[in-house]
Image (tube, rainbow, N blue to C red):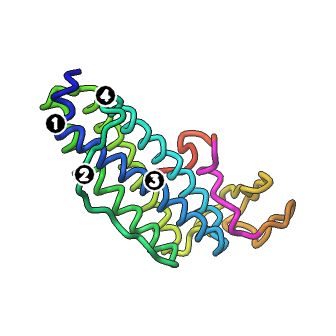
């Protein structure tokens, strides 16, 4: 890598913009998770926490790409969302929109710039992470639909419901009001199809 050219490149600016964005997303989702937990939406707490941890990894990937300028300052100017709400549905909607913005326009354009400037490895990171952000947006959209449509703990068909606290599995069209094993409230139940290590839809399904 030509360090002098890299220091003057738009790709370096884009990396720092992405690092800042991912770092902020991690914090926003951590804040959202705490709020959902307080409202007994422990499944949504898990969704936001799970996604926050992935955003942290994205931030580290972008940060590591900047090792050639370690010890220097990188000035950026960017716009970032203020997604404050006490309504879980609003938090899901705002998170969905942010993820789709990154996946639909921002990161693909950053990838194009990196490739044009001769940084194919960085371009690959932007393009691959863009696809991950699309899956994040799909996941938030899925839980928006479930929460907004009254289906977070109720289903039209019988299925398994997993208690996130103790692992008890209930079969039925609705999660129990409280877990018969550990006593935790309904908010700790999620659909078994979306459970950790649960098959093709591992963790939280896209469809």
Asked if the stretch drawn in magenta spans residue 186, the answer is yes
Alpha-carbon neighbours of circle 1 within 10 Å: few (<14), some, or many (≥20)?
A: few
* Element type where label 3 sits in the image: loop
Which residue is the site of mark 3? 207
Which residue is the site of mark 2? 76
| Nearest to viewer (mark 3 / mark 2) | 2
Q: Is 49 placed above or below 196 here?
A: below
Q: CA distance from mark 2 to mark 1?
A: 12 Å
Alpha-carbon neighbours of circle 3 within 10 Å: few (<14), some, or many (≥20)?
A: few
Q: The magenta stretch spans which residues?
A: 185-196
**Image location of residue 68, percent across then percent down:** 31, 28
**Image location of residue 86, percent across then percent down:** 52, 78
Residue placed furthest toward the left: 116
Which residue is the site of mark 1? 8
**Image location of residue 72, percent across then percent down:** 31, 38
| Nearest to viewer (mark 3 / mark 4) | 4
Residue 179's disc number: none
Which residue is the site of mark 4? 68
Quarter of the view holding residue 36? bottom right
In the figure, is residue 125 to the left or right of 48?
Answer: left
Q: Give the residue at x 76% y 70%.
A: 185
* Element type where label 4 sits in the image: helix
Q: Is 170 placed above or below 62 here?
A: below
Relative to the observer, which residue lies in front, 89 or 123?
123
Label 4 or label 1, whichever comes before in sequence order: 1
């Amino acid at each position: 890598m030509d360090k002098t050219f890299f220091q003057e490149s738009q790709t370096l600016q884009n990396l720092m913009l992405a690092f800042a964005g991912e770092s902020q997303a991690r914090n926003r989702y951590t804040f959202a998770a705490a709020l959902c937990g307080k409202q007994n939406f422990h499944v949504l707490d898990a969704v936001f926490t799970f996604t926050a941890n992935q955003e942290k990894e994205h931030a580290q990937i972008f940060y590591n790409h900047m090792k050639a300028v370690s010890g220097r300052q990188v000035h950026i100017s960017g716009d970032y969302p203020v997604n404050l709400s006490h309504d879980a549905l609003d938090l899901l909607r705002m998170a969905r929109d942010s993820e789709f913005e990154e996946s639909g326009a921002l990161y693909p354009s950053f990838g194009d710039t990196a490739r044009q400037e001769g940084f194919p490895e960085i371009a690959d990171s932007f393009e691959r992470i863009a696809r991950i952000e699309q899956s994040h947006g799909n996941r938030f959209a899925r839980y928006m639909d479930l929460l907004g449509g009254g289906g977070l703990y109720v289903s039209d068909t019988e299925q398994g419901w997993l208690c996130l606290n103790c692992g008890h599995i209930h079969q039925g069209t609705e999660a129990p009001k409280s877990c018969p094993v550990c006593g935790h409230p309904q908010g700790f139940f999620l659909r078994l199809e979306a459970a950790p290590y649960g098959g093709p839809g591992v963790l939280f399904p896209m469809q």
